Each structure stands twice: as structure tokens, then as C-alpha cells.
Image (tube, rainbow, N blue to C red):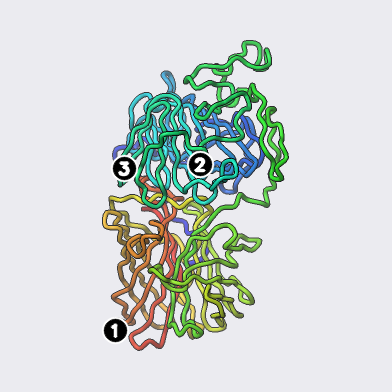
């Protein structure tokens, strides 16, 4: 299969199916709020990504990103206000709100059927004064992150996620990687598989990325203090929402009389009607130069430069002669500096383990070199991209030195990449999800033959942290079938991320003759549609198979969605 696979993207629960059918065509373009302030590179990831400026709608399922010198403030339809820090990314996964005299004005797949707000923090942080949603019931508002879920009871709080990308405060050591929380007013509660914690006004907590165990902090964490907050004596924990103090819904007096119109009451305005912040706001540009962003003017971004982010990449190939390996498949997380793309956004370089996630597995740097992307595809829902390098020679340099360059004259190196992200997706600890094939490369063998992947499935048992993979493909005149199980990263190596997986095919047959072997590796990805938003929306997998005699090796890549 090649290109976008046109397949159903959502499975609606029976209780809301009749309600949502009429809304489904417009759900992806449903407003959840508006931008009331933007400066620098602020974008919404859609198809294609678009720049955001003051007055623009923010839609359900938008991922809003801010650049290194950018900020944004959002006013949601329920009155909630979010101030997003630089180098941050949030996704509005669900937003349903019905005012007293209106029907629901925003919608997404939701099991509750009532008002709901679900935001996922992918990178960086924000502060918020919550609105009507969250005052009604504890389960109507959630902020999801890589380490767990946060709920509220009508509050003003700050949140920051550090994943090797948070700067040191006052020249000290960089903050420990994890999630930082602080409450100005109200109550928040955080939960994950290791426990839960409740925070009230003036309290702080930290959840490490590695242990994921919440712990209280006696003092405000320096990382949580946003240096770009209004320079008006704002304290750690004070609300950074310009024009509002820490008391929910109350207003500071404007610095300039009449700057908000005749009545000076921004709260009475519809989303997007608020003017620029009352107070002078100064931030540092990319080169360290202070700039005044009080006016709220947002420079236009170059549409040819989409916001960059980290990616997870899985690969597979036939024999690696330099390593005396009959076939290999590996997966690894790549920082922005680890991978390269061509003008079409297809992968031309990456870093990944040579064959295994297990402890001691060696990484290598892969380069398309003199080969080329012979077959590429993508899926518009999961945002997964895939392809295979063929022809010429691909460069492979192990971390230990030397080279394992791969001749691709008679085989291919297959790859699949996650969409951009700044932190890996959160993985549930309970439940089972069955994923369907939404795209794939054509399987290839080590004799220059190209086949067809007829069917494949991926079942994730999150309760036991296991995955099951099945494949059915034809190559030449032969029918290959394979099935096997694998486990998520931490069960292979405690240092590995939970969204990675690896397994072995313990049943491989060619034309009904068993005895073959195989391996697969892959990852789960956030993007995609699901009847249960706690499940990752997509998954990428690469595989390698050998027949019973070890003469023929088949490799390929597959994309999955629709859990």
C-alpha cells in the first residue's frame, strides 16, 4: 500500500452515536475558543499547519505550538483562559460546552455526553484560570501528560513538563526531567499508575519522568517561574494571564485608562474580543534581545518552516553483511538534531538501535547516502509517515565506530516515523486495544523482489504491557504468514520509554511450511481517532522475517490506527 489509506477513523460508543453522527463531518473544524494574544511563532497543527494570530479560532483537536520566543493566550468558550509559555505544545483533545441557553458549541468524541475539556500537554507549560467546565464536576476537566492526568476543582494553576529541554534557573543546574505543578487558587489532583496527590493553593508537586511517583515540594520550583511574565512584581504562583489577578474571574485595573474600550470590561467580551494585555510584557528574542510584545502583534511565520519536534523512528532491513545479521528491526527516539528530512518531509537520516531495545543494544546513525526514497506514504489521521530506501548504498555508522554500510541494490531499508512531538505519548496501564492497518510499504526480500502486505493487525494489552502482531503478505508466488508477541520498552530495559515495543514472531510460515523466524519493533503515537482517548491513536511497526532455511529475508513497515 502506498499513500494515504482511506479508512474509517472513529468508532463511536452506542450511547452517543446518534447524537454525534450529524456533527461528525464538522467535528474536526469545531471552535473551542479564540486567540486573544499571540507573539512570535504560534501555530495550529492541522492539514496543513497554520499560523495563529489574535482573533483566530482554536479548534477541537488542534495542537497549538509556540516557538522559542513566542507566547499565546487563549480564551475558551467556557471562559477559561490559558497563557502558553514559549517552546510549548498543547493539544485540545476534547471540548464540549453548552451555555445556559445554547446547545453545545464545541464537540469531540466523548463518553460523558456533557460538558468536557481535555487538554494534552505535549511540551513546555502554561498557566490557566479555569472556566465553567470543571466547576460542574471533578471529571469534566482533564490535563493529560506523559506522566499522568490532572483534574481540578475550579482553580488557577501552573504546569510545566521538562524532558531535557528546560533551561537552568539563574545559571544553576537544569531542572530534573518531569512534570512540575503549582496552585494559586482552588484544588488540583493528579493521578497515575503509581499513586495520586492533591494540591491546594500555595502547594507544589513534582512527578519525575523516570519513576513517575508524585512528590510534594516545600518551595516553589524555580522551573515553574516563567521569566517572561509581566514585569509588575508578579510572584511565583501568580497568574500570568494578563489583565487578571490570581482570584478567578476578577480583574486588575488597567494600566492605561480606556485601553479596553468604553466600559473597560474585557470579561464581557466574546472570545477574541479582548484587546492586548494591560501591562507591558517583555520577552527575549532568539538572539537574547528584549522585545516588547504588549501590543499583541504577531509576526507571520514562514509556511515553509513547520514547527519542528522530536520523532520516534522504527526501521527494518534484510541482511546486514558487515554485522553478520540475517535481518534486523529497531526503534528509537530521535531528538530534532538526530534525524533529517528531505524537501517533501520524508526521512533521510535518523538514529536507532541496530537491532534490539534490550540492555546494551548499540545505537547507530543511519544516512540515506546514495540510496533514495523509492516509496513513501502518510496517513492524515495518525500523521504517521513511512517509506523505504532503495538503490545505491545507505550509510550505517555504529556508535562504537567503523561502518556497516548497506548495499540496497537488491533489498530495501524500511522506515516509519511518528509525527513531531516534544514528549513521548502517555501509555495507559489498563485496557486492550486492537489496531487496524492504515498504511504500509511494500514488503521486499533480499533478492530484489517486491510484494504486497495483504493484512496485518496489532493488539495492545496495556494491562500486561504486551503487544501481539500478525502479518499476511505475498511475495513472488509465495504466501508468508507470521504472528508473535512482544513487550513494551520498560519490560526489556527499565530505561526505555513505555511507548516503544519489540517482539519476536514465533510462528512464521511460507506457503504453509512453518519453521521460519522473525522480529518486529515499533512505537505508539498520540495522534489519531479513538472511541477511548486514553489509548494512543496510532502505532508504527517494522518487521523482518526469514524462511525456515534462512535463505530469504523479507522486511517492511506498517502503520496502524483506529483503536
The disc, 3 or 1, on the residue closer to the chain's N-terminal end is 3
Q: Residue 127: tell me if it is visible.
A: yes
Q: Label 2: few (<14), some or many (≥20) within 10 Å? A: many
Left or right position of 491 against 40: left
Image vertical order of residue 291 relative to residue 368, above or below:
above
Q: Which residue is mark 3?
A: 13
Give the structural element (helix, strand or loop) at label 3: loop
Is 422 positioned to the left or the right of 140 in the image?
right
Which of the two discs, 2 and 1, labels the residue nearer the N terminus? Answer: 2
Q: Secondary structure at mark 1?
A: strand
Query: Looking at the image, do the residues carrying marks 3 and 1 touch, with CB atoms under 8 Å apart?
Result: no
Residue 550, placed above or below residue 362: below
* Percent position of residue 13, x then y: 31, 42
Residue at 52 percent across and 40 percent down: it is 223
Mark 3 nearby-residue class (10 Å; few <14, some 14–19, many ≥20): some
Q: Is residue 432 left or right of residue 341?
A: left
- Please give the label number shown on residue 90: 2
Marks 2/3: CA distance?
Answer: 26 Å
Residue at 34% over, 79% down? 517
**Residue in the picture at 33% in, 68% down:** 470
Tag 2 near tag 1, CB within 8 Å: no
Disc nearest the viewer among 2 and 1: 2
Residue occupied by mark 1: 513
Q: Nearer the viewer, residue 303 or 242?
A: 242
Asked whether the residues under the numbered discs 2 and 3 touch, taking CB atoms below 8 Å apart as contact, a structural biologist would say no
Element on which disc 2 rests: strand
**Residue 351 at x, y = what percent?**
53, 67
Reading the chain from its start, which is encountered first: label 2 or label 3?
3
Amino acid at each position: 500500500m502506498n499513500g494515504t489509506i482511506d479508512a474509517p477513523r472513529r468508532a463511536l460508543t452506542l450511547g452517543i452515536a446518534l447524537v454525534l453522527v450529524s456533527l461528525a463531518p464538522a467535528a474536526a473544524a469545531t471552535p473551542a475558543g479564540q486567540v486573544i494574544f499571540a507573539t512570535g511563532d504560534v501555530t495550529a497543527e492541522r492539514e496543513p499547519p497554520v499560523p495563529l494570530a489574535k482573533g483566530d479560532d482554536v479548534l477541537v483537536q488542534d495542537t497549538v505550538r509556540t516557538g522559542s520566543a513566542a507566547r499565546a493566550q487563549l480564551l475558551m468558550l467556557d471562559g477559561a483562559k490559558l497563557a502558553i509559555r514559549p517552546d510549548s505544545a498543547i493539544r485540545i483533545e476534547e471540548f464540549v460546552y453548552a451555555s445556559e441557553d445554547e446547545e453545545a458549541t464545541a464537540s469531540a468524541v466523548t463518553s460523558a455526553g456533557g460538558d468536557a475539556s481535555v487538554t494534552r500537554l505535549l511540551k513546555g507549560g502554561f498557566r490557566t484560570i479555569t472556566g465553567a467546565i470543571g466547576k460542574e464536576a471533578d471529571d469534566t476537566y482533564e490535563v493529560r501528560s506523559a506522566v499522568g492526568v490532572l483534574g481540578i476543582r475550579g482553580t488557577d494553576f501552573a504546569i510545566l513538563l521538562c524532558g531535557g529541554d528546560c533551561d537552568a534557573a539563574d545559571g544553576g543546574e537544569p531542572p530534573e526531567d518531569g512534570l512540575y505543578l503549582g496552585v494559586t487558587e482552588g484544588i488540583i489532583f493528579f493521578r497515575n499508575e503509581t499513586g495520586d496527590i492533591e494540591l491546594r493553593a500555595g502547594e507544589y508537586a513534582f512527578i519525575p519522568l523516570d519513576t513517575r511517583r508524585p512528590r510534594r515540594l516545600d518551595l516553589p520550583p524555580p522551573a515553574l517561574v516563567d521569566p517572561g511574565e509581566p514585569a509588575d512584581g508578579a510572584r511565583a504562583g501568580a497568574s500570568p494571564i494578563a489583565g487578571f489577578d490570581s482570584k478567578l474571574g476578577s480583574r486588575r485595573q488597567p494600566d492605561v485608562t480606556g485601553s479596553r474600550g468604553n466600559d473597560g470590561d474585557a470579561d464581557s467580551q466574546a472570545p477574541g474580543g479582548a484587546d492586548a494585555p494591560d501591562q507591558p510584557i517583555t520577552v527575549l528574542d532568539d538572539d537574547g534581545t528584549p522585545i516588547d510584545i504588549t501590543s499583541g502583534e504577531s509576526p507571520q511565520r514562514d509556511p515553509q518552516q513547520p514547527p519542528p519536534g522530536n520523532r520516534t523512528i522504527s526501521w527494518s532491513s534484510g541482511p546486514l553483511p558487515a554485522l553478520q545479521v540475517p535481518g534486523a528491526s529497531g526503534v528509537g527516539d530521535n531528538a530534532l538534531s538526530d534525524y533529517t528530512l528531505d524537501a517533501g518531509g520524508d526521512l533521510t537520516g535518523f538514529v536507532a538501535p541496530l537491532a534490539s531495545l534490550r540492555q546494551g543494544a548499540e545505537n547507530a546513525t543511519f544516512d540515506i547516502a546514495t540510496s533514495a526514497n523509492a516509496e513513501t506514504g502518510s496517513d492524515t489521521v495518525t500523521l504517521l509517515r513511512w517509506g523505504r530506501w532503495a538503490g545505491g548504498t545507505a550509510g550505517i555508522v555504529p556508535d562504537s565506530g567503523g561502518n556497516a554500510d548497506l548495499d540496497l541494490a537488491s533489498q530495501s531499508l524500511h522506515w516509519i516515523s511518528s509525527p513531531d512531538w516534544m514528549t513521548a505519548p502517555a501509555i495507559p496501564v489498563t485496557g486492550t486495544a486492537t489496531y487496524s492497518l492504515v498504511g504500509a510499504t511494500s514488503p521486499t526480500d533480499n533478492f530484489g523482489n517486491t510484494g504486497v502486505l495483504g493484512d496485518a493487525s496489532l493488539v495492545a494489552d496495556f494491562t500486561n504491557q504486551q503487544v501481539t502482531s500478525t502479518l499476511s503478505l505475498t511475495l513472488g508466488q509465495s504466501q508468508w504468514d507470521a504472528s508473535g508477541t512482544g513487550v513494551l520498552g520498560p519490560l526489556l530495559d527499565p530505561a526505555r520509554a513505555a511507548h516503544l515495543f519489540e517482539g519476536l514472531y514465533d510462528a512464521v510460515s511460507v506457503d504453509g511450511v512453518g519453521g521460519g523466524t522473525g522480529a518486529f519493533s515499533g512505537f505508539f503515537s498520540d495522534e489519531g481517532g479513538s472511541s477511548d482517548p486514553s489509548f494512543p491513536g496510532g502505532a508504527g511497526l517494522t518487521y523482518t522475517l526469514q524462511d525456515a532455511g534462512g535463505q530469504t529475508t523479507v522486511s517492511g513497515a506498517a502503520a496502524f490506527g483506529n483503536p
